[in-house]
Amino acid sequence: MDLAVQYLRRKPTLQEIETGWDRFEKMQDQCGFGELGLCCRNCLMGPCRINPFGESPTRGICGITADGIVARNLCRTIAVGAAAHSDHGIHIFEVLEKISQGVKLKYSIKSPQKFEQLLKKFNLNLDFEKGLVELLKLAHKAFTSLEGAMFWLEKTLTAKRFAKLKELNVIPIGVDPTIRETLHRTHMGTDADYKNLLLGAIKCSLADFLGMDIASNLSDVLLGIPKLKFSISNLGVINAKAVNIAVHGHNPLVSTSILEMTPFFHEKAKEAGAEDGVNIVGICCTGTELLLRNGIPLATNSASQEIAVLTGALDAMVVDVQCIMPSLADVCECFHTKLITTMSIAKIPGAMHVEFEPETAEETASKIIETAIEAYKSRNRKLVDIPNICQETMVGFSPEAIFELLLKINEKEPLKPFIDNVVLGKIFGIVLFAGCNNYKVVQDYNFINMAKELARHNILLVATGCAGGAFGKCGFLSPSALHICGEKLQEVLIELGKYTGFNRPLPPVWHMGSCVDNSRVIRILSAIAETLEVDISDLPVAASAPELMSEKSIAIGTYAVSLGVTTHIGVTPQVLGGREVTEVLTNKITEILDAKFIIETDPFIASQKIIEHISNKRKKLGI
Ligand code: SF4
Ligand code: MSK
């Protein structure tokens, strides 16, 4: 769908360079057992595969059923997603911990406002230094104990949802122990009851939410709360006259230090011939972190990460963790582009490794920028071809930025004007778009078509991660895209826009952050539900991951359902081989969580199903 990507992918001189789309074609037909989630290699008697047509073999060698295998695989997927999010959180935690211990770092607390907010939320009536120590103790307890997890979740979720989860006995026993327990129960000969495994999956997904909520909150404390601002998105943000550094992955620590060191290298870049100095652009969630906090332009989202290199004008691609294609090394090899890995747990053969440590962040960042400037000197001008495509992008819709805006309308009850518009049907509902791209779907096709369908029905859209990237690139994060909304929603966005100081309407899609910031959406929905004295599951809301790819997305989708948000998935998940499991996830789960999964690959039918779901919720609320 992205014209910039289409242009470079179809360029005759670049045809020899293999990308994810080529590898996807070569991979066809993909294994049917794997597609259905019916293979198991959890022990060395395997691999075992179950016949999906009910014929023999109907059980693994150990005797486990198809539903048992599918549920076990799902648990493992969620555990990996939760581990990725929480490890990200730990990286931020460790920097704050060092600050609290007085270690001299380049980082300092950028948002005292967020820090105070968290102290208040957790009843910590303390001064700065003691407050920081106690806040970190709480986060650590949430990572490691049931007591800590209970405390953090009770203070974050609606009372009704928390009570429901407690009754189901699915409150995580801390983030880390829950991941451990989940992996344990999936060991050969341990949990064989698919229902019990699915409860384990719910519990682990809540550990994911917890780790993510800690990561998102602590990132705001350390790096600042995103505020409303304008930037630009798509490959046109790469500047032929500058040394271009793309930052990619998920860890904002590395990229933030590169960004902060950049001003010291403009002159050096100019001396090397780059008249516009150093230009930082973002890819995936690292890009999103810098986009929302610092207004740094976003080059592209996940499926087209290799395409950014094909512009011939990237001098360095700096990567940290998660969603980084190992193939980048081969693509960079075709150009002068330096691929630089920065984290000890994420190395790529063929890449240069510059280890990142918070204590030496400045030196590391300087070394990376200098490497990019050196690479620039060998840039082949003949290979440079940057599609002149980029879109205005309004970002920074953190809960704090939204509340700040609403406070200007109603100082006493800031949520009231928003809720009134929901009641009046001017905002018919809210849908969160999250998750990745997936080569099984034409890139951004489901995002764009579903957004158009839903916005037309006056549904307000919020986005995170690569969903936000898709909407940025196609222009839906710009106030100029107001026309995709129904008239009633247009009125609301125009009215709210009057209070931003930008004298523009708000865009149809509100970008809330990276993958870990999905927890921001839950915080807002919880606040609305508490105001109305209902549960999140009573609200006219839904979530959609129409092009999901990563294990993290499965974890997010599962916790969204666990927290009462019916969630659409646009790529067939690897569970359909377990008939009972599928029936539970798409139907019976409603009995215990009042929310379910909608699996639908057609974006138009999916939109209809979401609209129907929202209509039903409105009817139940009597609005
Ligand atoms: Fe096969 Fe059971 Fe071993 Fe899985 S755990 S590989 S189903 S024997
Ligand atoms: S980066 S998890 S491809 S959203 Fe967060 Fe994008 Fe999905 Fe990675």
Image (cartoon, rainbow, N blue to C red):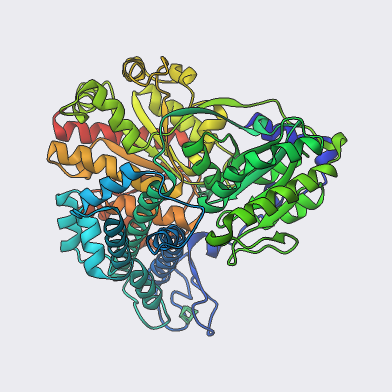
Q: Quadrant of the C terminus?
A: top left
Residue 200 occupies quadrant: bottom left
x, y (%) of residue 311?
75, 37
**575 on left or right of 17:** left
| Towards the viewer: 190 or 249 | 249
Report the label total. Answer: 0
**523 on left or right of 269:** left
Tell me the residue at 61%/46% (across/down): 247
Q: Quadrant of the N terminus?
A: top right
Residue 302 lies, with reference to residue 169, above or below; the image says above
| Towards the viewer: 280 or 554 | 280
**241 on left or right of 580:** right
Report if residue 611 is visible in the image: no
x, y (%) of residue 322?
55, 56
Report if residue 116 is visible in the image: yes
Tell me the residue at 53%/31% (across/down): 472
x, y (%) of residue 32?
56, 61
| Towards the viewer: 249 or 470 | 249
Residue 545 lies, with reference to residue 137, above or below; the image says above
Tell me the residue at 35%/28% (across/down): 460
Residue 350 occupies quadrant: bottom right
Residue 111 occupies quadrant: top left
**278 on left or right of 107:** right
x, y (%) of residue 369?
69, 48
Tell me the residue at 15%/57% (across/down): 163
Residue 403 lies, with reference to residue 215, above or below; the image says above
Residue 65 lies, with reference to residue 468, above or below; the image says below
| Towards the viewer: 44 or 559 | 559
